[in-house]
Each structure stands twice: as structure tokens, then as C-alpha cells.
Amino acid sequence: MPNRLRFSYRRIATVLCVVLAVALLAACSGTKPRVEPPELEPVAGDMVLRGLWYRQPQVRHEPDETALAPFVEGKRFFYSDRPDRVVALDAIKGKRLWSSVLPPPSGAEDDPVHLSGGIGAGEGLLYVGTDEGEIIALDPDNGAVRWRTRLSGEVLTIPLASEGALVARTNDGRLTALDPVSGNALWSYSSTVPPLSLRGASRPLIDHERVFAGFANGKLAALALDSGEVLWEVTVGVPEGRSELERMVDIDSDPLLVDGVIYAAAYQARLVALTSVAGSVLWSRELSTAQDMALDSDTLYLVQDDGRVSAVSRRSGAVIWQQDKLAGRTITAPVLYRGVLYVADQQGYLHGMSIGDGHFVARFRVSENAISLAPMVSDDVMYIQTIGGALHAFRIDPK
């Protein structure tokens, strides 16, 4: 998730005080010099980037309007090429299958839809959220609107549907479950929202009639999927420090569940492994991230807030290796592809690292534009969307 601050109008006075305090501290201590991205060293890799297709954006985008995660299902690639439109492409050839401009809600014809959070799917439908708090269900075959329901706040996560329920997070700290067929509300769970938090939220996780969700207050909760009953709640991040900036402990990274163990991370706090049944902590490590993690059979891979890429043992939490040569380049969340760990950066580069020790094994200049979303991998194809809205689909093969 992008590390942009979200300001609540109801808490604007508090936020202004924080900003003034930071400004006063800066005035007393002097201006901190801007850290330039480090120079990239040559990589003697033996891999080549083979483009499958490229799609140029049809309209000019602002950066915030391209931070919508796409979705791949089978041979179809779904994405948003402008704030109010969803497009379906052939995932292999890049050919457009359909596009759907989402109409404004009834009675708000002069207020166009602005999508937020990304595109989700499940139970036979696509789902998108808006900054006005709507969940809209679409037919994946033609983009037709099946239903739309208004929630209590802006939708900042990718809606997720599974096991007969659709769950979505809103910026007011609420997790809501809907009937995926009708859009009718089933239940909601509310968490406390701190005065200042990162923009974005972790995507809920559904497994065996339970839903797991992280919140801006640093807590991870397990709820019964059919009723919203709280099964357990664990504090992953404990607020520390004097200022609201220092006390932010959002869980913006999506929790991961493997073999009955949940892995969750909180910003400016720690990474934990917990049992999914009782929420018992198996181990914890002081590692801070607000981005999604990748994992394989033995290892978790994450990008720390200082730009270091870290590999952590799934069983013990021990740090196996760290790669610090991308610090200052504002890199994306990591993704595994053909046994190599990849991240992209704001200068349009794609960096490949060995999963064994973190040394660089590949580097490609994908675009002149910044890449803020993590690469997406499906059916042996990697997809990258740039800040400008361009789409790239390719494979990385041995030379």
C-alpha cells in the first residue's frame, strides 16, 4: 500500500497541531537534506525481458488515480484506465474485451464515480469500491452493474468475496460483510481510528468461515464470517512516541495465512506469526513495513520502511539476509517469479534478487515512468502498471 497520510476532517485540528510541531522541530534542528536514490551498479544477469504486450493509457492520469490494483482471473485482466471506468483485456494478448463506465449513483448525476482501493472478485462477480463509500458489483463477462451498496466511508481496500460473503474495509475503521449476490449488509465490525494514519488499509483474509483483518490501530482481529462475532483480537503494533506521527502503527500489509499460521506486520512496529485458531503469538520481530509481503515454503520477504529488502524465516522470525542497496529508491512490495524475488521502483526499474542471499541477479528498465504498484504475477506472466497508466505484460527468460 502507498505510504501516504490520510487526514480525517473530524480530526483536522489534531493533525494541524502535529504538522506545526514537526515544522517547529525542523526549524530548531535545521533542514534535513534530501536523500538522492543511490547509483545502480551493473548486474551481470543471464535473463532477458520478453514483452508480450503493452497498452498505452487512453487518458492522462494523476498519480492517485493509477494506484488501483488490477486483477487477473484465468485469461482475463481487469484494470481501471480512468477514475470511473473498468476495462477487461485478454491477459495473454492485451486485446480489449470490454470497458464499462460506471454511472454516478441515482440523484448524483453531476458527481462522477471515483474508484478507490482496487478491483476484487469472488462468487462469480467483480467488485470495486469508491471514495464516496460505494461497493459496486460488476458482471465479469461484460462489465454490467449488478448492484451497488453504500457503506459508511471511503473504500480503501480491494473487496474480497468468498464462502458466501463479501468483506470490505472503509477509512472509518469499519469492516463490513455483504451478501455477494444482492449487496445487502450482513454485519459490521468497528475499530478505533487513530488521529493520524497511513492512507490505505490491509485487505481482509477469508479462510474456513473466518475473516482476518488488520486495522489502523495496530490490531489484528479474527471474526466469524457468518455473524461478525469476534473470535480473537491481537495487538500487533503498540503506539510509541510523543507525536501522532511517531505513534502510527497501521496494519496496511495484507495478512498471510499458511498451514494454520498468520503472518502480519504493523508500520513502525513489528512482524508477528500467530496461530489462526487462537491468535497465540508464535514469534515476533521488530521489523516495520506497510507493504504486502511475499512468501515461499520457508521464507517471508518484505520491504522495510527504510527501503531494505529482508528475508525472514517463517518458522523462527530470524532475519536470513537483507539487501540495502535499494534504500532511497521508493520500491514496491516484493513478488516472486520463477524463483527470483522482484521489486520495482519510482525510476521505472525492475530489480531481481536471489532468494538465497539477496544479491542482484537481474535488472531491467521497464518504463520511463514511476512504478508504484507491486508487479503482479499470474500463469507465468508478470504484469506492471506505471504511474502514467501504461500496462506491460512480459516474461523473464534465460538468455
Image (cartoon, helix red, strand yellow):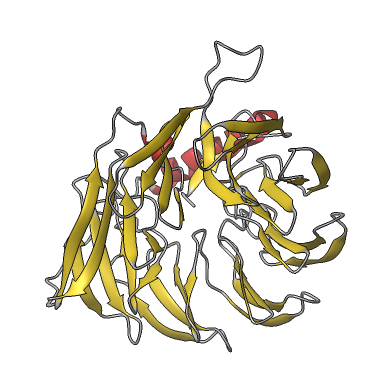
Q: Position of residue 382 (x, y in %)?
A: 32, 61
In the depicted structure, whether residue 253 falls above or below residue 106: below
State the residue at coordinates (73%, 34%): 152
Q: Nearer the viewer, residue 130 or 178?
A: 178
State the residue at coordinates (52%, 33%): 115
Q: Nearer the viewer, residue 279 or 188?
A: 188
State the residue at coordinates (34%, 87%): 356
Residue pushed farthest front? 141
Tell whether 70 sits left or right of 224. Answer: left
In the depicted structure, whether residue 15 falls above or below residue 277: above
Q: Position of residue 286 (x, y in %)?
A: 56, 74
Camera sees residue 388: yes
Q: Position of residue 135 (x, y in %)?
A: 65, 36
In the depicted structure, whether residue 116 falls above or below residue 225: above
Image quarter in which the C terminus is found: bottom left
Tell whether 177 sits left or right of 340. Answer: right
State the residue at coordinates (32%, 39%): 389
Q: Nearer the viewer, residue 337 or 43?
A: 337
Camera sees residue 221: no
Indicate the quadrant where residue 28 lies.
top left
Circle count: 0
Tell whether 81 sits left or right of 13. Answer: left
Indicate the quadrant where residue 225 lies.
bottom right
Q: Position of residue 50 (x, y in %)?
A: 18, 62
